[in-house]
Structure formats: C-alpha cells, structure tokens
Image: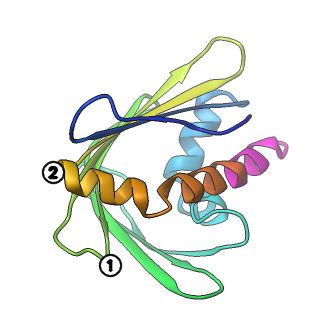
Amino acid sequence: MGRATITTPAEREIHVERVFDAPRDRVWKAFTDPELIARWWGGVGEKVVVERMEVERGGHWRFVVHGPDRSDGFEGRYREVTPPERIVQTFEWDGMPGHVVVETATFTDLGDGRTKVTTVSLFHTTEERDGMLQSGMEEGLNSSYEALDALLAEQP
C-alpha cells in the first residue's frame, strides 16, 4: 500500500498515517494478537520475540527484535485500549532508558474494506523527537508495515 506518511505537526510530535488493504477488525487483531505481532512488528526478515503483551489498561508489553547484527528491546504500558478504535501506550527503547514516548494509535474504517492507522507519538522534548527521526525510524517503520501488508494479504 506504499510508504507511511510521516510529519511533525508540533514541536514534540511525530504523526504517522498509513492505509492498509484490510478491514479494521483484521488490522486491530494484527496489532493486539501476540502471535501476529511477532510476524510483522520487527520488519521484513527480523525475528521478534514477544516477551509480554497484556493488551489492557495498565498492561505491560515487551518485544525483542533480533536482527542480523544486533538485538533491540522495546517495552511500555497500555494506558487505554478501546477495541477496535484506539490504543494509547508508552514506548521505550532499551538503548535509551528513561526516554518514554506516549503513542496514540487510531484505527479508522474507511468503509471500502481498508483501514487507516494514524499514530501520534508525543516526546518529552523536541530533541528526543528529532533523535527518533534520525535513528532510522522511518525505514524500520516502513519495513514493519510492509511485513504487515504481507500478513494482511493472507486469507483471513
């Protein structure tokens, strides 16, 4: 479905929009089912181990991505889970402990069998936001979304 649209509408935000060629319930499940997350979250060719995924308010999530050169851990807590419309969670990378991002993902049914996922990431400072943009985030995100496209293209 193409690349994600990534913008910075405010000093501490990253705004990402991506349309998936699947109904909202299937996209929601791909974001909330540990078995499915492990098949797309790290991107094409990456192995993802879902160590924890408690999809409920206050629940903890932790994923470890094993790439060819290194492993990276990511974790956070769910602040809001409103199926199949919205997830608010914290996001922290093991490589920068203490730098917590608040992510709000909204799942919009486009009415034609497609779903738009909009994610707003709120950083503590503009410098942290810019550091994320310079970290290769766009490449990693698009690789993950390409893997999600392939997963969603499989028969339900």
Q: Which residues are magenta?
A: 147-156
Looking at the rendered structure, the secondary structure element under dot 1 is: loop
Q: Write the residue at 20% across / 65% down.
A: 99
Q: Is 89 above or below relative to 64?
A: above
List x then y, in percent, for residue 24: 59, 28
Q: Going from the N terminus, do you reach mark 1 or mark 2 first?
A: 1
For residue 95, which numbered disc appears in the image? 1
Rate crowding at label 2 as few (under 14), some (14 to 19) or many (20 or more) other CA atoms within 10 Å: some
Instruction: List the single residue furthest toward the bottom.
Output: 69
Dot 2 amino acid type: Thr
User: Which corner quadrant holds the C terminus?
Assistant: top right
Q: Which residue is mark 2?
A: 125
Image quadrant in which you'd find residue 51 = bottom left
Compute the Cα span from label 1 to label 2.
Answer: 17 Å
Q: How is the image coloured?
A: rainbow
Dot 1 amino acid type: Gly
Instruction: List the single residue furthest toward the right.
Output: 155
- Horizontal side of 131 relative to 139 (left or right) equals left
Camera-side mark, 1 or 2: 2
The secondary structure that most of the magenta stretch takes on is: helix
List x then y, in percent, for residue 126: 20, 48
Q: Write the residue at 68% across / 23% down.
A: 114
